[in-house]
Amino acid sequence: MVSCSSSSKKAKLAKAAEAQIQNLESTNIKTGPFAPQKFLAAKQLTSNGENAEAYFSADSKRILYHSKKRTEHPQTQIYELNLATMRERRITFHDGEDANAVYTSDPNYIIYSSTTDEIKEEREAISSVMKTYAPNLLKKHPQVNGLDFRPFEIYLSKIDGSQITRLTKSPGYDAEASVNAKSTKIVFVSARNGSTNLYLMPFSLSEWTKKNDADPRPIRLTNDNSYNSNPIFVPQTDQILWIKYSPDLKTSQIMLGDSMAKNPRPLTSKPSMNWSPFFNPLGKEFVFSSNRGDGVHFNLYTLDITNQCLKRLTDSPDDEILPAFSPDAKKLLFTSNRSGKNQIYIVDYISPHACLDELP
């Protein structure tokens, strides 16, 4: 005979097990080498116009992103969204294109790229750069990183868009700036010497806010004819992670170099487009977007640089791109066209349990 207390205990255990199973099912987590999360139920943060490339503030309460095709403006402009109130505000009001906005270590200042000045300057030089670079890039692969070689320059401003300081002044493309954790240096991409390479320049917020013009002393880090793109600093180490494209721009690999981008080694190798890496602030992994699944659609993956453990986060028939961790690594932002046009989404980050059985 089974006692009442024993029956009651078994019933409680069964109920707890059932609840755990329902919880796993509700978050769409599966066991095995591929463990997709609840990305289809990710919260959509934007809807007005087309929005992309979002990054968290240091306190994870706000995000910066660029937006275009709005009633107020067709060109890309920088916006900030308060995640608590879901109220956004427009930061830039330029006649040119604005993109690549990131926070500095001081929450009152941001860095971004813009064509607003150079479209009015040195028209012959700009025309030459456009004829040389943009047509080939757009023809061969229009979605390399959402940008062509338009005449961008890099700027610093207050978070309300005031007190603008121009950080670069070189005909052609200067963009994709990344600031290290201490805001002491900036790595960026420039086409100033005939090909897109990585450049480094010192950065001091207290000094730059006193200046009215660009620093002419960036250091060239890479020196080849490849298309180098998307540089970011690795937290704590100041190593540099970036993208290196094949000559035909049909594939790209993620590279890791030291603080001067020297001794580079590829972290990915599969012939596919591997791009938009973003390092986990608390770990040894980075998240990136790749079309390695079917050669067409982009999905999100993570790669641990210590053991080469590759994990797949999404399995979408749409494009999931431009991921970014929150500073505590509990949330993940990404851009997706699942609604028919690019919008920004947010989801809780839970790493899949197992590695994929394939080389990165």
Image: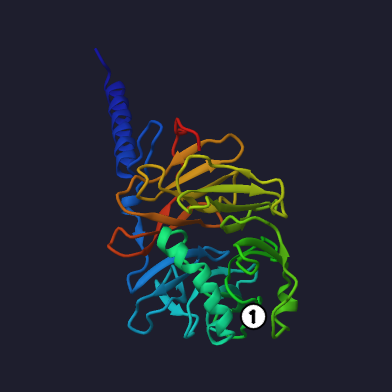
Left or right of 314? Residue 218 is right
Left or right of 15? Residue 200 is right
Q: Is residue 203 visible?
A: yes
Out of 228 and 232, give the one closest to the viewer: 228
The colouring scheme, among rainbow, by chain, secondary structure or one colour, is: rainbow
The structure residue drawn at horizontal position 37% and vertical position 65%, both measured from the top left corner, is 45
Q: Which part of the image, by quadrant, shows the N terminus? A: top left
Location of residue 125 in the rendering, given as x and y in whole percent from the top left corner? 58, 79
Look at the picture and state if 217 lies above or below 249: below
Look at the picture and state if 14 lies above or below 266: above
Left or right of 289? Residue 181 is right
Q: Amino acid at mark 1?
A: Arg
Location of residue 209 in the rendering, given as x and y in whole percent from the top left corner? 70, 81
**Residue at the farthest left position:** 1
Q: Residues within 10 Å of mark 1 (few under 14, many from 20)?
A: many
Out of 165 and 143, give the one closest to the viewer: 143
Q: Which residue is mark 1?
A: 166
Q: Is residue 108 visible?
A: no
Location of residue 95 in the rendering, given as x and y in whole percent from the top left corner? 47, 85
Secondary structure of the residue carrying tag 1 is strand
For the image shown, how many numbered marks are present on the structure? Answer: 1
The structure residue drawn at horizontal position 60% and vertical position 62%, both measured from the top left corner, is 195
Res 306 quadrant in image: top right
The structure residue drawn at horizontal position 29% and vertical position 39%, both measured from the top left corner, is 22
Look at the picture and state if 32 lies above or below 125: above
